[in-house]
Image: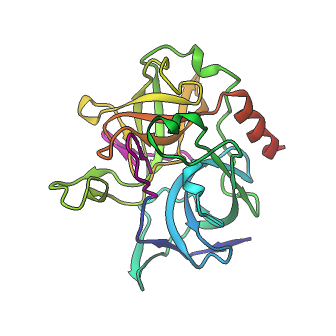
Amino acid sequence: MKTNKLITFTLIIAITLSATLTTTATAITGNTQPDTTPYVGVVVLFADTERTQPFGYCSGFLISPTVMITAGHSLVGAQAVSVCFDQGPISYKIEGGQVVYYGAETIYNGNPVAYPGYYPTLAGNQEFQTSDIGLIVLDQPVSDVTEFAALPTVGFTETLLQNTELTVIGYGLQDQVTPKNNSPEKSWIGTVSRNSATVQLINANFKGSDYYLKLTANSAQGKGAIAFGDSGGPVIYTENGQDMVIAVNAFVSSSNCNGVSYHTRLDTTPILAWVTGYMA
């Protein structure tokens, strides 16, 4: 089913998991641009099937009218989701400890599906041992989005040269304030809006490169980054005007969201087989 006008967001605007090496990424930072890509949406996560217990949000993108891709770690603990494709900034106000959204866009309900090969073990390099990806199967086809990105062929990202320019898209926090009194994670602020930034591919020859792409995350050098709220958003390669989603925003190397970022590859045999199976 779908509902109009009303959806609730929790005050917790990011899924944050502690780690010794990595911090889960959940917004596009540095040289951001408002984004109009129609198939990228914001996903509200609920701890119950009745959708009365929202606990956070992430990003995601449609690959068909009923199937979305998002990050696997975002779906940990989620029993149901609601999705909106409003570009934002999303208007809301706090009522009873929740953020109530009064947007005019249509809200779609759906169910999370965890990738069977993902294990949320955020403990150092163990993060590289699984593919951080999940799906959302919507109850009803999306009627207001008719444009979708193409999926890559197996091994496509291995043909890309170092410093190939890509685009990352997501909803979430855009700026970090100082001093960071409560922790770096809690110092991030921003609106719930769809934003994009240009990034560059780093040489993929690293531990975990069979699961992830490694991208720049240094806004000081004029390059975009991902932060809290962007998990599940797409990494897009564009050629001849055609978008191809080649990876999914997954996690970053520091809680300040600088250094490098990691993105789950879609161009592996098991991932493509699993995703296209749900599309069929």
Task: Identify the residue at horizontal 70%, vertical 63% (top origin).
Answer: 110
Q: Main secondary structure of the magenta part?
A: loop
Residue 196: percent from left, percent from top: 43, 42
Q: From what the image shows, is residue 234 above or below residue 84?
A: above
Examine the rendering and report whether any part of residue 39 can be seen.
Answer: no
Quadrant in the picture for the C terminus: top right
Q: Relative to residue 50, is residue 262 drawn left or right?
A: left
Residue 62: percent from left, percent from top: 65, 48
Q: From what the image shows, is residue 47 above or below residue 42?
A: below
- Residue 67: say if magenta: no
User: Residue 209 appears in which quarter of the rendering?
Assistant: top right
Quadrant in the picture for the N terminus: bottom right
Residue 48: percent from left, percent from top: 64, 74
User: Residue 187 appears in which quarter of the rendering?
Assistant: bottom left
Task: Identify the residue at horizontal 54%, vertical 16% (top origin).
Answer: 160
Q: Relative to residue 144, is residue 22 drawn left or right?
A: left
* Start-end of magenta stretch: 15-40
Name the residue nearer the viewer: 118 or 173.
Answer: 118
Q: From what the image shows, is residue 22 above or below residue 99?
A: above
Q: Relative to residue 67, is residue 183 drawn left or right?
A: left
Name the residue nearer the viewer: 190 or 217.
Answer: 217
- Residue at the far left: name it: 179
Task: Identify the residue at horizontal 61%, vertical 64% (top origin).
Answer: 78
- Residue at the far right: name it: 280
Task: Identify the residue at horizontal 42%, vertical 86% (top origin).
Answer: 96
User: Residue 133 appears in which quarter of the rendering?
Assistant: top right
